[in-house]
Image (spheres, helix red, strand yellow):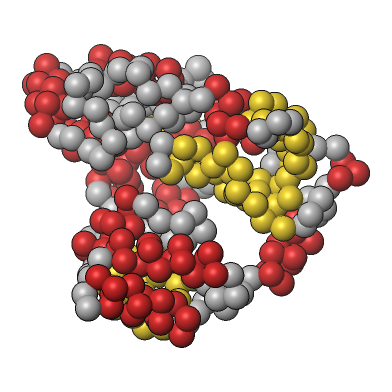
């Protein structure tokens, strides 16, 4: 653990406890007595008023009406925060106005040279989905659908919801237990357990016209929900190893219920495991098209015979 990080953690420990001893900090952070004493002296020099107590059980306490000193960011930490903001630009994220105020406050905390560095990075860095014609870090052109923020607010209270969707000719309400919230291909999507039909479904947030808490009588316990999901889960029959080119294609488009398990820290290789219902011709056709879309940078570990045959037919069609 770096010294700056350790001192920040010790300050939070001190502030939360009010009173502490050197032995407690030694045990909490697994550091020597001399290191604790040096850190305490540095914390006092930063402005935290600590008072030592004399006696057999003596220690330290924080003087009343005292608070932690202002958090200080290193150059690398500030750059990490702003690059994260840049990478999520034009992603229709909730709390965007709060993100703007955070960026403005951070800009006010850093030096002019740090600001120059961020302006330079903002000019040269472009991420997938970023509009190069709107490079302003604080641009509010990517506001999310109004229902997204309402959904987030509701979720902080309860995952049992009734969502009303606008269909072609009518509206329909679904009592659900929300499993996951996705942002994919510029759309927010809900993966939810339909409490009435007792199965997992995908809902587009763009189609939602109302969100309400679900009544208690319609609910199933979380234990029952996950038990029913596990009973429906099929064993994987498609296993692929993806290289960097296939991973790039996967990120452009992939079925919602598929995810990668990266096998190296640089995310250049990954394993995909999923179940394909070979008794559904449309599903076999769709997965065949998608596998061709992934390209040649894949290694097949396991594949249903029907899918393999469909792939071979498609390849023969294009390369007789």
Considering only vertical position in the picture, is 254 above or below 20?
below
Name the quadrant of the C terminus. Answer: bottom left
Query: Which quadrant of the view contains residue 49?
Result: top left
Picture residue at 46% right of the left edge, 62% below the top: 286
Picture residue at 47% right of the left edge, 81% below the top: 306
Tell me: 54 left or right of 139. Answer: right
User: Is residue 265 among what the camera can see?
Assistant: no
Q: Nearer the viewer, residue 297 or 215?
A: 297
Considering only vertical position in the picture, is 291 above or below 308?
above
Q: Position of residue 235 (x, y in %)?
A: 57, 78
Q: Nearer the viewer, residue 231 or 52?
A: 231
Query: Which quadrant of the view contains residue 121?
Result: top left
Q: Position of residue 51 (x, y in %)?
A: 43, 29
Q: Position of residue 209 (x, y in %)?
A: 66, 26
Picture residue at 85% right of the left edge, 37% below the top: 215
Considering only vertical position in the picture, is 243 above or below 126?
below
Image mark count = 0
Considering only vertical position in the picture, is 210 above or below 223?
above
* Residue that extends furthest to the right in the rendered view of this protein: 217
Tell me: 280 left or right of 101. Answer: right
Tell me: 175 left or right of 148. Answer: right
Q: Nearer the viewer, residue 176 or 70?
A: 176
Q: Position of residue 122 (x, y in %)?
A: 16, 27
Tell me: 187 left or right of 172. Answer: left
Picture residue at 72% right of the left edge, 58% below the top: 199
User: Is residue 246 among what the camera can see?
Assistant: yes
């Amino acid at each position: 653990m770096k010294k700056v990080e350790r001192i920040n953690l010790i300050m939070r420990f001190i502030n939360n406890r009010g009173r502490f001893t050197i032995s407690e900090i030694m045990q909490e952070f697994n550091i020597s007595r001399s290191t604790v004493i040096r850190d305490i002296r540095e914390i006092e020099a930063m402005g935290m008023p600590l008072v030592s107590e004399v006696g057999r059980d003596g220690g330290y306490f924080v003087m009343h009406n005292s608070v932690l000193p202002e958090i200080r960011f290193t150059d690398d930490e500030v750059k990490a925060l702003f690059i994260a903001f840049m990478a999520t630009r034009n992603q229709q994220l909730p709390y965007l106005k709060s993100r703007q105020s955070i960026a403005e406050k951070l800009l006010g905390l850093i030096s002019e040279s740090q600001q120059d560095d961020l302006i330079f990075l903002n000019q040269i860095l472009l991420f997938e989905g970023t509009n190069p014609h709107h490079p302003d870090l604080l641009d509010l052109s990517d506001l999310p659908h109004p229902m997204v923020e309402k959904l987030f607010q509701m979720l902080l209270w309860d995952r049992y919801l009734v969502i009303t969707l606008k269909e072609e000719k009518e509206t329909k309400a679904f009592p659900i237990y929300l499993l996951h919230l996705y942002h994919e291909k510029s759309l927010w999507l809900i993966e939810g357990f339909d409490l009435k039909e007792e199965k997992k479904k995908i809902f587009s947030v763009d189609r939602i016209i109302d969100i309400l808490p679900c009544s208690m009588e319609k609910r199933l316990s979380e234990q029952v929900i996950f038990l029913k999901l596990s009973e429906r889960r099929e064993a994987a029959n498609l296993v692929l190893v993806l290289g960097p080119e296939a991973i790039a294609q996967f990120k452009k488009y992939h079925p919602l219920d598929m995810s990668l398990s990266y096998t190296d820290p640089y995310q250049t290789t990954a394993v995909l495991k999923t179940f394909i219902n070979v008794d559904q011709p449309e599903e076999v056709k769709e997965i065949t098209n998608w596998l061709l879309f992934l390209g040649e940078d894949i290694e097949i570990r396991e594949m249903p015979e029907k899918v393999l045959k469909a792939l071979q037919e498609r390849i023969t069609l294009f390369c007789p």
